[in-house]
Amino acid sequence: MAEYVHQPHLNHSIPSSEQTVWADVSPLLEAACKDLKDGELIHGDHFNLFAAMSALEIMDPKMDSGIVCRYYSVDEAIEDGIAPVPLSPNRTVDVQCIIDIMDHLLACEATWHKGHSLAQTVFACIYLLRPERTASHPLLHSYCRVIRATCNAVVSVVSEARTHEEEDIFTMTYGLPLKVDGDDKGLSLLHAVEETISRQLRACKASSSKRRSVEDTEPLQTNPDLEEGYCKALLCRIRFHKHFYHVLTCMRRPQGKGLELARKHITSCLLELDNILKTLEFLRSNKCGTCEDGQENTTTASGCPPIGFDAGLNARLSAPTPPRTIKILSWRKAVEYFQKLLNDLDTICSFSLDPLLDEVFRFVVEFQKSRPDLVARAHLQLLLVKDGKLYGRDSMFAAISKAASLPEIMMNHEIQKTEAFVQLEQLVINLIKVLSTNAAWQRRKLGKILQDWRVIYIQLELVSSRDFGAASSISISEGDYMKISQCILLWVEEQTYWISTRFLVLGFELELYSPNEYCMVYWYINILLMKLIEKTHLKLLTGSEVAKRKVKKKKDSAKDSIRDFLIPPAVLLLRCHMYLSEGLTMMLAALRNDLNTFSSPGPFNTENERFVQHFELLLRASVPEHMSYLSFSEQISQACLSNLGRYNYFRDAQKILKELKGSFSNDQERMAELRRLEHVAEHNSVAVNLISRLGALEPSLKVSFEFIHHPYFATAVVKRC
């Protein structure tokens, strides 16, 4: 393994020459690996910790510059015959070559979406780098135009959503010909080519007697027996990219006006992808070249390597592009990627544009469960937030007022111009954007914005009823203003606790907690859910009173208010979550107290330190107030196996789940969630009874917790060793 020394102050690589001296650094690296222990770094006079953290990771194609470079320029590659036009003197081979290019470009697009450089994936195609060379080949020329337009549309949406920094997708073009004069006409040119091939396909299908009467068409290639198969293979690939381009453009129409049409194009795209998969057998059996080893990993349906590509070609054309060759996704995986992307985009298009703001948050969370890639999430974010408005149509203040159950008269209230409400609107926008990011990025950002939500709550509290009324030209009583102010404050508190809960449960998805820490995490989640339920109820009660314009003074507690109010299904679902988290807390606490399991301290820090590490951002924002490790340890210290079965929280969760089935019968996603929760409650209820009866008597009893039914509510698995 030979590596050259990279000098950060240089903006380009120094080419090899006769004076260049190369040395094999493998023995040095091997010796360093043997001497260094975990966590140790090599220190030098001019190599500090910062430099170590900024160093390149050797052999990582996204970081290591490497030295793989076959050609120094596009012209050199063309002179070497790597991208001929026409593709082959043999017309049958020419058709097969264009299909291979199409397939490889599809794999390159998917690889680019997954985070690799645009220069090393899609624009590794020389035909894209030299648009003028393909003018004599209408099919290849028009297809390359649409590819460039599609890439430009993706770059536009990801850049505008400003989410590309969360992952490695490259949106910078660095001089690559992403926009070429005439590309706007590429779709019409491709349509003309499609019509020509369609006529030829109809001619192939016509009987011999009718074939003479069919309009004269020039065959694609010289073998009549293969003509129909090649026509079908070309048409499905052309039509897929044509419809995919329409999907991207329709979804960018303002205020979601193109979503219905986008869904039709998505259906067509998925149909053409199925047709593309059906051409596999035909192309494999009639390949014109030598297949690559391992057909499942090839980037073309035929298995033959495509012509006209060189992944290292742009290494010297764009400085930030690492020239080491990357691994392109296989053709089949690329098709699977686009199938998933289109299904995710269809989910976005099917979302109603008139829900409450709280429902928008929950839709984004549900959407994230399918693990959508960056392109889909960027489209979702731009649909929800455009020009500082919800769906680019409704002001955020109006959306907040509606979510907080304020009367319609408040939608255009002058109070929205005050500094506190302007900041609240921006916080809501930021929250939508954060929820649209990947899980790791989302969790970090949620933890950071918690303090902002607590600060805005304090600022809104300072807005007195008199200030509220003074800013208004609408005649509303002071009592009503008090209720309106209370609704806003309750909604802000509700969202704060919801964000906190989301922050903690994402830790399970990211596997940030060890089994020894489950008890404290579920304990904290249980406290947050209790607060969330309380604030949600009070918000609904207060909003109902304002809507009826009845000002009542109630000194009763939240529990007394709940008795007089029909509990909504969404709140019942929160109660179910609360019972599950409380049940898991008590089960884990009893196991650690009586059997000394799930309580062993880590080798590096105490449980108190781990408590602070996991909940530092929540504690700093006082969500909720007066939380500490001492309160946690005191509450779980009384839990024991003998009392575990007396009050089974999982049975209470099961009762609620039975009630909710009728409420969510028309909501497939909610019903799926209920089934998952039901499995957790049922299995844990049995486990509680078993542990409480046999735990102290059976030393061989082993209890583990696995996420086999739900992503963040664990299921207890009881076994005998």
Image: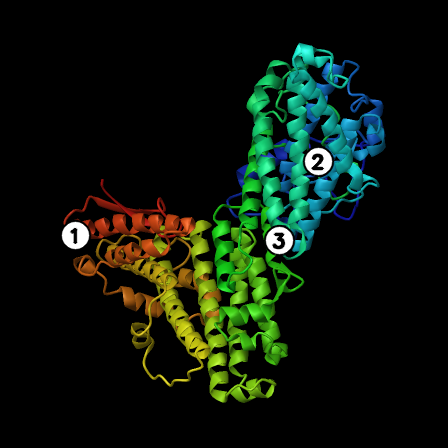
In the image, residue 514 lies at what x, y percent?
39, 51
Asked if 514 appears above or below 233 in the picture, the reply is below
- For marks 3 and 2, the one nearer the N-term is 3
Residue 504 drawn above or below residue 175:
below
**Residue tagged 2:** 122
- With 146 as the anchor, is 605 left or right in this view? left
Under mark 1, the amino acid is Ala
Residue 96 rendering spot, x and y as whole percentages: 69, 19
Q: Amino acid at mark 2?
A: Val
Question: Dot 1, crowdedness within 10 Å: few (<14), some or many (≥20)?
Answer: some
Q: CA distance from mark 2 to mark 1?
A: 63 Å
Local packing at callout 2 (Cα closer than 10 Å; few below 14, some 14-19, many 20+) is many
From the image, state whether disc 1 or disc 3 is nearer to you: 1
Looking at the rendered image, the quarter that the C terminus falls into is top left
Image quadrant in which the N terminus is located:
top right
Q: Position of residue 520 (x, y in %)?
A: 35, 60
Q: How is the image coloured?
A: rainbow
Nearest to the observer: residue 44 or residue 169: 169
- Taking the spot 82% from the left edge, 31% from the top edge, the residue there is 74
* Among numbered discs 2 and 1, the one appearing first in the sequence: 2
Is tag 1's residue or tag 3's residue first in the polypeptide sequence?
3
Q: Look at 60% across and 17% down and name the residue there.
A: 282
Task: Tell me the residue at 40%/67% (across/down).
Answer: 532
Tag 1 residue: 696
Label 2: element kind: helix
**In this rendering, the label closer to the viewer, 3 or 2:** 2
Residue at the disc numbered 3: 49
The vertical placement of 190 against 362, above or below, is above
* Amino acid, disc 3: Leu
| CA–CA distance in space, label 1 to label 3 | 51 Å
